[in-house]
């Protein structure tokens, strides 16, 4: 290639010039981005707000099992079915809807006797008797049911009735709030209002103006109970029945938000 050719020289100079222009533009862009980031960091404020909502639980959940052992599987199944029918009638009489009663599991399995094989030994160090052939000696049937109670005034009556029927493995009640999403929204609204008020005060103290919100984050918390004694609230009255006293207390739902504002 003839490097002294005028055309080649012109093309080379043009390429060098283009590379120089691109280098300058790239450097300007980097400087602009750095300045922009610095300006953003220097022209924002962040505030945190908190909101709390208290609510008395309005829903309870109870689970229990109905079990029976019998030598014949059909007999065990019949006893369980009869008891379950009693529990369903009880729950219906107490106003619990069928959609809130759910069978979690139904199991039936044989019970074995693993009798040892008899070993006759008249000396020291006799061998350990070996397990004999397993023999079915009966069956166990179990049905687990979960109940959701939307009228918490009925919880004690449900527990008392189930105990009289003779159910097993009763768990609960677990008290919850039916409309937890709605209460979380209320707590978040209070937290946002709190953050906005703090931002106004801070902007006034700094002698700046709030322009717009540039970021938002929320940190909610799981509701936890704050118990009180139902008996204590009712005075010293003596209960008229053996139904258990079940304080529901209050559930506290909190929301914590952080808002970042652009300022001028």
Image (cartoon, grey):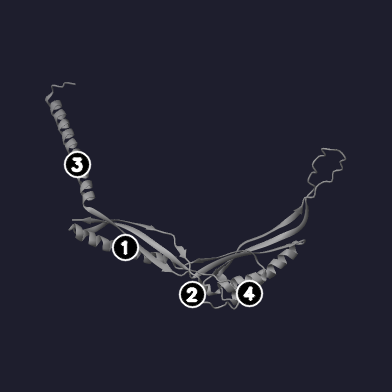
The percent coordinates of residue 97 (x first, y second) are: 56, 73
x%, y% of residue 142? 67, 62
How many marks overall? 4
Q: CA distance from mark 1 to mark 2?
A: 35 Å
Q: Residue 108: percent from the left, percent from the top?
A: 69, 59
Distance CA(mark 3)–CA(mark 1): 36 Å
Q: Quadrant of the C terminus?
A: bottom left
The residue labelled by disc 2 is 233
Helix, strand or loop status at disc 1: helix
Label placed on residue 89? 4
Q: Are marks 3 and 4 in contact (CB under 8 Å)?
A: no
Marking on residue 129:
none
Q: Is residue 31 left or right of residue 95?
A: left
Residue 128, above or below 42 = above
Chain-order first, disc 2 or disc 3? 3
Q: Nearer the viewer, residue 6 or 48?
A: 48
Sequence-wise, the earlier of marks 3 and 4 is 3
Residue 151 can be seen in this image: no
Q: Is residue 35 visible?
A: yes
Q: Could you give the CA–CA distance between mark 2 and mark 3, rounded to whole angstroms?
A: 69 Å
Residue that mark 3 sits on: 31
């Amino acid at each position: 290639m003839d490097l002294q050719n005028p055309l080649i020289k012109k093309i080379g100079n043009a390429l060098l010039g283009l590379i120089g222009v691109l280098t300058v533009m790239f450097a300007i862009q980097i400087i602009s981005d750095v300045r922009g980031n610095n300006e953003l960091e220097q022209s924002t404020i962040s505030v945190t707000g908190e909101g709390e909502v208290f609510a008395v639980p309005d829903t309870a959940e109870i689970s229990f099992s109905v079990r029976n052992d019998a030598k014949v599987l059909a007999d065990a199944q019949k006893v369980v079915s009869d008891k379950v029918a009693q529990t369903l009638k009880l729950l219906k009489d107490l106003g619990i809807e069928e959609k809130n009663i759910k069978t979690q599991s139904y199991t039936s399995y044989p019970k074995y006797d693993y009798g040892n094989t008899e070993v006759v030994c008249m000396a020291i160090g006799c061998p350990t008797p070996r397990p004999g052939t397993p023999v079915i000696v009966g069956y166990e049937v179990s049905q687990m049911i979960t109940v959701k109670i939307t009228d918490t005034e009925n919880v004690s009556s449900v527990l008392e009735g189930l105990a009289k029927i003779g159910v097993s493995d009763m768990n609960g009640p677990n008290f919850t709030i039916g409309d937890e999403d709605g209460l979380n929204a209320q707590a978040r609204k209070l937290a946002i209002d709190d953050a906005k008020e703090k931002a106004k005060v801070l902007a006034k103290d700094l002698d700046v103006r709030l322009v717009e919100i540039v970021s938002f984050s929320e940190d909610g918390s799981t509701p936890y109970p704050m118990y009180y004694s139902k008996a204590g609230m009712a005075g010293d009255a003596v209960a008229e029945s053996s139904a258990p006293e079940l304080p529901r207390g209050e559930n506290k739902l909190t929301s914590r938000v952080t808002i970042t504002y652009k300022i001028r």
